[in-house]
Each structure stands twice: as structure tokens, then as C-alpha cells.
Image (cartoon, grey):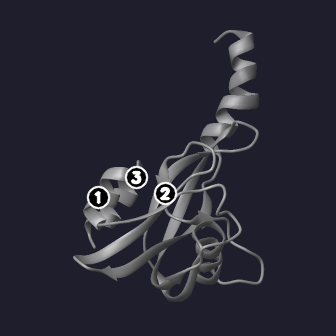
Amino acid sequence: MTRTFAKAWEQVLRPMLLRPKRVQVAALCLRDGPNGVEVLLITSRDTGRWVLPKGWPMDGLSAASAALTEAWEEAGVTEAEIDPRPIGQYQYMKKLDSGVPQPVDTHVYRVKVGDLAASYPESDERVRRWVTPKEAAGMVQEPGLQDILRSL
């Protein structure tokens, strides 16, 4: 190993590869549609790809409550019931503000949606769409989330 590579390995590459996964919480928002169960997807703010409402755990809130808060802020979900137990989890690489990729375990909570608000904190930054679970599985990029959606 060259001295430059060895230094880069110890200072940058090795810590990045050995970094523990962080945890996020996601709301799998569901409703009974005219043709069966529908899933609410939203676009991410940075890339515009289709995702579930999700975010970091919040001090003072259970994981399920934090997921429900994300559903309100990112998708305008109101009048909702959330299952306090996760129905599954998936992994993905999140690009942090610093540009460094961070492995993330995302715990998914089932939310039965009663209504959506027209105006909500991120309404000007995202698009939301109700789709079938099969359509949703084809729209999201994360294989583990695709599996969860296909199991509905």
C-alpha cells in the first residue's frame, strides 16, 4: 500500500465503511380505495424520487409517533391511526448534507389515513400520489421497501 492510500484508508475510507447504520422511521400510509388498498407516496425534496414520509427519531416521541409527525409534515396526513409496532424495515444509503453516504435502517410503521390536508409544512416542496401497492413497489428504488409493498 502506498503511504497516501494508507493514510486515506485510515482517515476516510475505513471509518466510512465501518460507520454504524443510523435509524429512521417511516410512515406507510394506507387507505381503502375504490379498487382496494392504496399507498401514499411522496417525492423526496432533493432528487424527486418516490419515497414514504420518513425522518429521524425525535426526542420525547415514540418511533411510531415520530413517523406520524413525518407523515403530517411531508404529506399532510391528518385523522390517522398508527400501529405502534413496525411492520418491517429496509436499508438504504442516505447522502448527508456533507455529501458523505450514510447507511440507514428504516423502520416502517403502518398508518391508516383518515384525511389529507390541502396545506401542510412541506406542501410546496413535494408531490404526493395514491397508488396500488404493486404500483408503489415499482416506483420506489429500495429493494427492501419494494418487498414490504409487495407483501400488502
Q: Is residue 16 visible?
A: yes
Do the residues bearing badges 3 and 2 touch, measured as CB atoms within 8 Å? Answer: yes
Q: Where is residue 108? Give x, y as percent.
A: 48, 71
In the displayed structure, 64 sits above or below 146; it is below
Residue 140, labelled with which disc?
Answer: 3
> Element type at marker 2?
strand
The residues bearing labels 2 and 1 have C-alpha atoms spaced at a distance of 12 Å
* Dot 2 or dot 1, earlier in sequence: 2
> Element type at marker 3?
loop
Q: Where is residue 101? Give x, y as percent.
A: 63, 40
Q: Where is residue 10? Give x, y as percent.
A: 72, 29
**Residue farthest to the front, as pictured:** 118
Residue 135, labelled with which disc?
Answer: 1
The residues bearing labels 3 and 2 have C-alpha atoms spaced at a distance of 6 Å
> What amino acid is at disc 1?
Glu
> What amino acid is at disc 2?
Val
Residue 51, labelled with which disc?
Answer: 2
